Image (cartoon, rainbow, N blue to C red):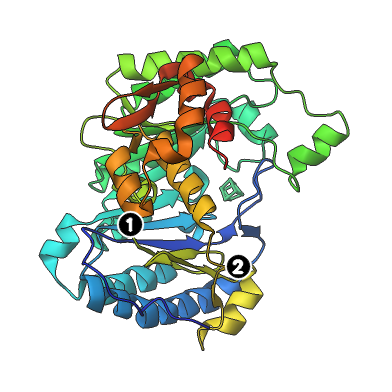
Amino acid sequence: MASPSKGGGAIPKRWGVYVHIPFCRQKCFYCDFASFAGRERDEAPYIRALCGELRREGALYRSRWGAPATVYIGGGTPSVLPLHLMEELLVNLREVLFMGDPSAMEAVEFTIECNPGTVSEAGFRLMRQGGVNRLSFGVQTFDDALLESIGRIHTARDARQGIEWARAAGFRNISMDLIYGLPTQTLAGFRRDMEQMLALVPAHISVYGLQVESGTVFARWQEGGKLLLPDEAECEAMYDLMASRLPAKGYERYEISNFAKAGCESRHNLSYWQDVPYLGLGAAAHSYLDGQRYGNAEQIEAYLDGAADGSARREEEPATREIQMEEFAFLALRTSQGIEKERFQKKFGATLDAVYAEAIHAMKKKGLLHESKTHVTLTPRGMKYGNLVFAAFLL
Ligand code: SF4
């Protein structure tokens, strides 16, 4: 076992914490995340183990870097936790990461992901009192029949009710996720979803195109010819609608899948894209420090077995220089800022041109990339056909 506490270097501007809650009430049919249904009996030991990991690793990070700039509790479904366990988790996070410092608590962006089928008014009040100031709602669609057909456990009414409760509890920074390209979904249906979401005036919106991932129920249905997905032209039309409608309503696209009102960009997501240190807690969580990655055991049992002595956390094979360059390029290209040439050169000791001149030239010719003196960014067309650009940036 290696600890991410070693190493020196300049104090970074910020660091982030990711907490993984792997429990869900039911597995959605498209989901390949590290999440499990029917494991309620593991919730209490899991939170206990995670708090132990937090006290060990979090204290080390904190002593080195001070309080984190962002905390993100994701999953799985964090909001599925019983309130006493949610409280235990929040109290521990507050004690270890902020040590009762109210100014650090005020400055942090502290997000919890919520499934609208697992939320309550009391839960939101508890989260707010525990320092959480941002919520991310997995709405996905407002079509109840479609929600059921993709394995979601909630209705559109649950989503609206949840958002009302969250606002009553004092949450102002609310994000919503939608998915397009769902089975049987039409452009008209997706347009209705967009309008219903916009009517709720979230601060931040994430929109993802459905990907059929192996090992999911959808993948099985697809193999059996039973997955009725909209065709490519219809999916493109949904994409075009999203790409034009959201900016027209004042949501700036700051990353391929993410849109925000001014000042409401997810700082946590941006920190991943900007290559800052982060500490991952819980099963399947990853940490990154001094260029080294650490990965936790993915299965709940393995995590619980190894959490006490730290053996659930393993140093990952160092990425080759080529892989680091690719990842740097992919992550930066996803953002509206694009690749900053100077940062690339500082990090790798080679100019962006020396490594990627050919790819940049080819993608510019296709109208997918824009190059300035300081940056290389995706054009609107490049955002749409991002996969072509990413393929060109493979070394
Ligand atoms: S609620 Fe989220 S994490 Fe859980 S199964 Fe559904 S998509 Fe996956």
Give the labeled residue for mark 1.
276
Specify the quadrant of the image occupied by residue 14. Answer: bottom left
Picture coordinates of residue 353 (x, y %)? 40, 35
Picture coordinates of residue 102 (x, y %)? 12, 66
Instruction: Give the SS element for disc 2.
Output: helix
Picture coordinates of residue 305 (x, y %)? 61, 83
CB of residue at label 1: within 8 Å of ligand 1? no
Q: Is residue 95 visible?
A: no
* Residue farthest along the right direction in this orientation: 224
Picture coordinates of residue 286 (x, y %)? 49, 64
What is the quadrant of the C terminus in the image?
Answer: top right
Q: Is residue 238 visible?
A: yes
Specify the quadrant of the image occupied by residue 369. Answer: top left
Front-lying residue, 248 or 129: 248
Dot 2 or dot 1, earlier in sequence:
2
Specify the quadrant of the image occupied by residue 90. Answer: bottom left
Front-lying residue, 289 or 280: 289
Front-lying residue, 380 or 390: 390
Horizontally, is 133 left or right of 325 in the view? left
Front-lying residue, 386 or 145: 386
Q: Residue at x 54, y 22 (%)?
A: 385
* Residue farthest along the front direction in this orientation: 354
Q: Residue at x 20, y 76 (%)?
A: 99
Give the labeled residue for mark 2.
40
The three-letter amino acid code for the residue at tag 2 is Glu
